[in-house]
Image: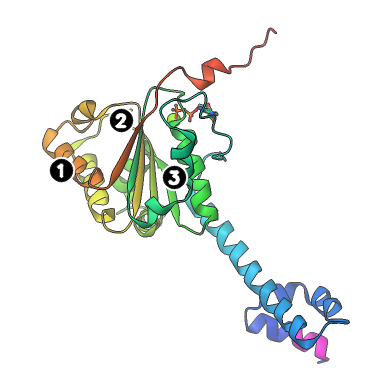
Amino acid sequence: MNAYSEIKQLAKTLSLSNLHNNTDTALRFSLNRTNEDFLLEILKGELAYREERSRAHRFKQAFLPAVKTLSDFDTAFQSGITKPQLDTLAKLTWIDSLHNLIFLGPPGTGKTHLALALSNHALNAGYKVFFASMDRLTHILKTAEISKHSRVRLSYAQTCNLLVIDEFGYLPLSRTEANLFFQLVSKLHDSASIIITSNKGFDAWPAVFGDSVIVTALLDRITHRCEVISLSGDSYRLAHRSSVFS
Ligand code: ADP
Ligand code: MG
């Protein structure tokens, strides 16, 4: 085996995937470089490759239904959150301090946009995120015992830094569903942040759960470290709807 083939082989054995995939580029780079520069470049390239792979993996596991960014959010249109508040959220320290965010408001006011944009931002910053509509999360919780797919999703949700529950309260929960949801929130209380988006104010939550005792216990946990952001005003969709007739 010549040196070139051996480099490729060893790079593979040592899981130096960047060097394995780009051996020619690495060798070309070595020309006219000092040994230190060359070695440094190899190591940096390997690190960048690994970081990008794990970023892509985090995005895949997060199941974001769309890409939204914080810079796309127009705070002039939405008076429920200011630009300085959005900038504070963008620092993501609320995830480190296990604070939860609850976005409340009528349809089209940007609840899902903000949840998605913060998820996107957190994923890029290296946090593990799991995004699900309440409907999907309920399905996962209910089928975890019989479905491997749900079990895998649930265990990912339980180990992430940020769990996003979108569209909470659209559908009422059965007693079993309410209990499973409560157990999940309790479990995450000391390990993860939660974002909940809902078009229902807290006063309407007992009707969603069909039980005010569980709601009291749930809100006690969720609001222990929490920011409630009430969005209001007109639907951004309606205000910016596109028309077939111009
Ligand atoms: P909600 O979840 O509150 O029903 P969405 O977040 O889905 O509303 O917003 C509906 C659409 O309007 C989305 O395409 C979203 O990107 C956009 N949107 C809502 N509010 C804003 C805003 N303040 N700035 C920019 N886009 C917005
Ligand atoms: Mg929404």
Residue depicted at x 65% and y 68%: 49
Residue type at mark 1? Ala
Q: Which residues are magenta?
A: 2-7
Tag in front: 3 or 1: 3
Residue 6 magenta-drawn? yes
Query: Nearest the camera: 214 or 36?
Result: 36
Q: Choose top left, top right, bottom left or bottom right for residue 142.
A: top left
Q: Which numbered disc covers residue 89?
A: 3
The residues tagged by marks 2 and 1 sit, at their Cα atoms, a distance apart of: 17 Å
Q: Secondary structure at mark 3?
A: helix
Q: Secondary structure at mark 1?
A: helix
First along the sequence among labels 3 and 1: 3
Q: Is mark 3 within 8 Å of ligand 1?
A: no
Residue depicted at x 54% and y 29%: 74
Q: Choose top left, top right, bottom left or bottom right for residue 170.
A: top left
Query: Nearest the camera: 22 or 176?
Result: 22
Q: Is residue 241 above or below residue 167?
A: above
Judged left or right of residue 239, residue 243 is: right
Q: Position of residue 91 (x, y in %)?
A: 47, 50
Q: In this figure, which residue is indicated by the disc labeled 2?
A: 169
Q: Is residue 124 above or below residue 209?
A: below
Residue 136 magenta-drawn? no
Query: Nearest the camera: 37 or 214?
Result: 37
Q: Choose top left, top right, bottom left or bottom right for residue 8.
A: bottom right
Q: Which numbered disc covers residue 230?
A: none
Q: Is residue 141 above or below residue 20?
A: above
Secondary structure character of the magenta stretch overall: helix
Q: In this figure, which residue is indicated by the disc labeled 1?
A: 217
